[in-house]
Amino acid sequence: MQHTEASLPTPAPASGNRFWQSDIAHSFMRSKVTMLAALVTLIFFVGALLAPWIAPNDPYDLRQLSLLNSNMPPAWVKDGSAQFPLGTDDQGRCVLSTILYGLRISLGVGFVAVGLSAVLGILLGLTAGYIGGRLDSFIMRVADVQLAFPAILIALFVDGTMRGLFPHIKRENSAFLILVIALTLAFWVQYARTVRGSTIVEKNREYVQAARVIGLPAFTIMIRHVLPNVLGPVLVIATINLGLAILSEATLSFLGVGFPPTEPSLGAMIQIGSRFLFSGEWWITVFPGAALAILVLAINMLGDWLRDALNPRLR
């Protein structure tokens, strides 16, 4: 028996093909600015990940540091050295190496803080929106109070509290934890308020009512049914907050609340370089500042694109 082509089953497209044929992929591919921002972000991520292998020097290794190499200009400037392409700081550390290692710190703090704040905000937002009542009012009033305190004040409070309770802990050992706690407490409100509003809408849908009828627990309904339908705005907030977290970490390190000058953080490097800026050693602060600005700008551009791509009204 002969089969016609119409009777043959059509093979299902592969998952990879479905992604590249989606509206999000089409929106990404037609925006050259977004593709450039993604490329720049990827370069910074790879540079931070491969810092131990591609950095000219290890700023943590005291055996590789020498005060005789301090305040050397970039390689293309007079008296510069090819060993230090972007020059050195006041401790003889290679500026390029400190940028690569500083990106590891900044991205690490940003990812952990954004992840924890997203989990905390999503759980509180789901609970407040689904259960409602006095619990909803209490969580939202706490969120309103939280909005009155910026991340810098929270970091100062957390820093003073931890140093008072644990005076034996060295600053370099507690800086990461202090920054993560401060940024988590500062950013969870946005997730909670957004998820709460979406949950109030979703809990009255038919699929939630059907889940209640068959006797599913409230926690199961929130996690299995409501949560997947409110994650779109959360992804946008997380992308934008990643840039804010990186910028906040640099700001706090610059003010002396974050990482100490012995740690190659971008904010600490800018703070060190600011003391030598008017004496001619501009490279100590300009290159870390430029790296920080470019990274945050690229991440924010990706966040703006993701917000537009996930909004059906803008397609």
Image (tube, grey):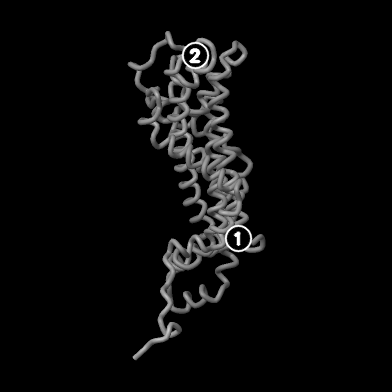
Q: Report the front residue among 165 and 242.
A: 242
Residue 191 location (% of width, % of height): 55, 52
The front one of 43 and 166 is 43
Residue holding disc 1? 197
Q: Residues within 10 Å of mark 2 (few under 14, many from 20)?
A: some
x, y percentage for residue 225? 48, 68
Q: Position of residue 139 (x, y in %)?
A: 56, 53
Q: Amino acid at mark 1?
A: Gly
Q: Upstream in the sequence, badge 1 or badge 2?
A: 2
What SS does tag 2 mark? loop
**Residue reaching furthest to the bottom:** 1
Question: In terms of image quadrants, where is residue 296?
Answer: top right
Tell me if I can see residue 130 in this picture: yes
Residue at the location (60% across, 60% down)? 197
**Residue found at x 46% / y 43%:** 111
- Dot label at residue 80: 2
Residue 265 lies, with reference to residue 79, above or below; the image says below
Please state which of residues 16 and 122 is positioned toward the viewer in this rendering: 16
Q: Is residue 156 visible?
A: no
Amino acid marked by disc 2: Gly
Answer with left or right where residue 184 lies relative to residue 277.
left
Q: Position of residue 176 (x, y in %)?
A: 43, 33
Label 1 vs label 2: CA separation?
57 Å
Number of marks drawn: 2
Relative to the observer, which residue lies in front, 44 or 215?
44
